[in-house]
Image: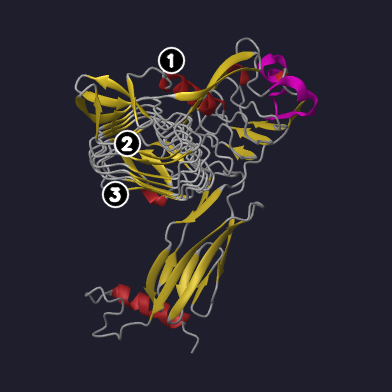
Amino acid sequence: MKNLIKFLLLMMAVLLPATVSAYDFEVNGIYYNINGNEATVTYHYDQYNYGEEYGEEYYDFYGDYSGDVTIPNFVTYNGTIYPVTTIGNCAFYQCKDLTNVTIPNTVTTIGSSAFQSCWSLNNITIPSSVTRIEGGAFWECSNLTSIIIPNSVTYIGGMALVMCYKLTSVSLPNSLTSISDGLLSGCTNLTDVFIPNSITSIGDYAFSECESLISITIPNSVTSIGYNVFANCNNLTTISVDSGNTTYDSRNNCNGIIKTASNTLIAGCSSTIIPNTVTTIDDHAFEFNSSLTSISIPNSVTHIGNNAFSGCGLTNIVLPNSVKHIGDQAFSFSSLTNVTIPNSTTYIGKQAFDCWELIEVYSRITEPATVIMEDYFGYGYVFGHPYNISQRTLYVPIGTLDAYQADSRWSDYFGNIVEMEIVIPATAIELDVSEIEVTTGEILQLRAIVLPEDATNKAVTWASSDANIARVDGNGLVTALAPGSTTITATTVDGSELSASCTITVKPQTPIMNGDVNGDGVVSIKDVTDLINLLLTRDD
């Protein structure tokens, strides 16, 4: 959140010009500057407030445009007719009583912060003459419910629609090639965004704080995506990438965005299932996602980037014995109460586990002195601020107590260090087959895959929803008995109560012709064996 606030303040400082009140002439209550042979609508204010807050001086401006304003196509000044081609920077800045603006089809550019903080403006139609909308143009138009952007627009600047709280849907024109930094950040009621297939890049924080956004599709034209694109989109549950995209994918319907060439997960949501082909979780991938309360990291992951899970709702995490690198602030400011660090870890970054509620750390590292642990400007804090040291316990492998106690990078942050056999619970289970069709008498071997690979207890129980159709033994061996459909389920026994299922449809045997029992087209001794198995499984 701190990064997001700093980003917004920086963008505001960049977008707001130092001087916004000068004008060349006024016609019918609208102020203009002359630019060559053209006129630009410019700013005029009737209130200029000075104040001080938190020891800092500030100046506040309120424009004197109000009600309905119609900008003409042409204005006459000193006998010369000028086409109105530009709505200048901050032209209607903080015109809090402005309700409607009619923009003529001579205007080609809407300037930076042109309508910023026009709190009463509720809708606007941009004519097809406009080609550029500069940064912050509609920043915090908090009552804006609709905006129509024509296909003539080829550029929309950063933060142009930030904090337009009442916008519920936005259709970006197919004339755009990029979505700028923070374009729709803070549009808290936005539920629907259409990204056209012309877009090649999506900037940092583009959809951050869009709390009502539920789903989004990345078209196959996109080749660049920034960081924190979905920060604080806590209701986002569906993320998909068009199958034709050659740079990114959402393989296995994972509800995340993966950089295909490097198998790097760059963005996810609360329903993301990380595929076991992912090797890196990128910087900021899940940052600020408070609705993410649990996630399984597969044992293919070796690198967790900076701030990857910072500010998330995770309460516990078991890192698989493949993770080597844990980046700066990787899990900082999350809700973690306990974490398991694998023996494969070689690097832990600054404030990686700076979590206020963290009370239990299970380290499987057998040689703690070999791990690189980055210091936070001389204050440590890899495991958080030391105020609650007495409440924290570090569990370490049997035989390593002395090594941990002698290493201040560990011992200085825990009131208790306890040796114990560390149990690694199962975090996921899947079957090698999820759906299959067989014939009566057929025998099928199912295999349960329990993750992580180093889980302490990988045993499972097997059950059939209808043993009259197909039965399963304790090893996952299925025998088809009668036509119909049944579900075979494998369940972990280590207390995690995870399960995975396979739907089996049993079809009747094809009548045996010419001794070809198994229907492979060849009569052989195998047909005799299969016939015996078939007869043994029949109840009659």
Crowding at dot 2, Cα within 10 Å, few <14 / some 14-19 / many 20+, comes out as some
Query: Can residue 407 be seen at all in this image of the molecule?
Result: no
The label on residue 513 is none
Q: Which residue is mark 3?
A: 243
Mark 1 — residue? Answer: 18
Rounded to the nearest whole Å, what is the CA distance between mark 2 and mark 1? 25 Å
Residue type indicated by callout 2? Ile
Q: Nearer the viewer, mark 3 or mark 1?
A: 1
Dividing the picture into quadrants, the one containing residue 102 is: top left
Image coordinates of residue 268 in percent, x first then y, are 46, 41
Most distant residue in the front direction: 79
Kindly state the secondary structure of the residue where label 2 is placed. loop
Residue at 80% across, 25% down: 390
Left or right: where 511 falls relative to 425? left
Q: In the structure shown, which secondary structural element does the residue marked by tag 1 occupy?
A: loop
Pointer 2 or 3: first along the chain: 2
Q: Is 352 left, or right, of 436 in this rendering?
A: right
Q: Earlier in the sequence, mark 2 or mark 1?
A: 1
Residue type at mark 3 is Ser
**Quadrant assignment, res 424:** top right
Which tag is nearer the camera, tag 2 or tag 1?
A: 2
Return the residue at label 2: 71
Q: How far apart are the alpha carbons under marks 3 and 1? A: 47 Å
> What whole-number distance in Å separates the C-alpha atoms at marks 2 and 3?
45 Å
**Magenta stretch bounds:** 385-410
| Whether residue 176 is situated above or below residue 408 in the rendered picture | below
**Where is 403 relative to 169, above or below?**
above
Which secondary structure lies at badge 3?
A: loop
Say above or below: 121 vs 56: below
The vertical placement of 275 against 379, above or below, is: below
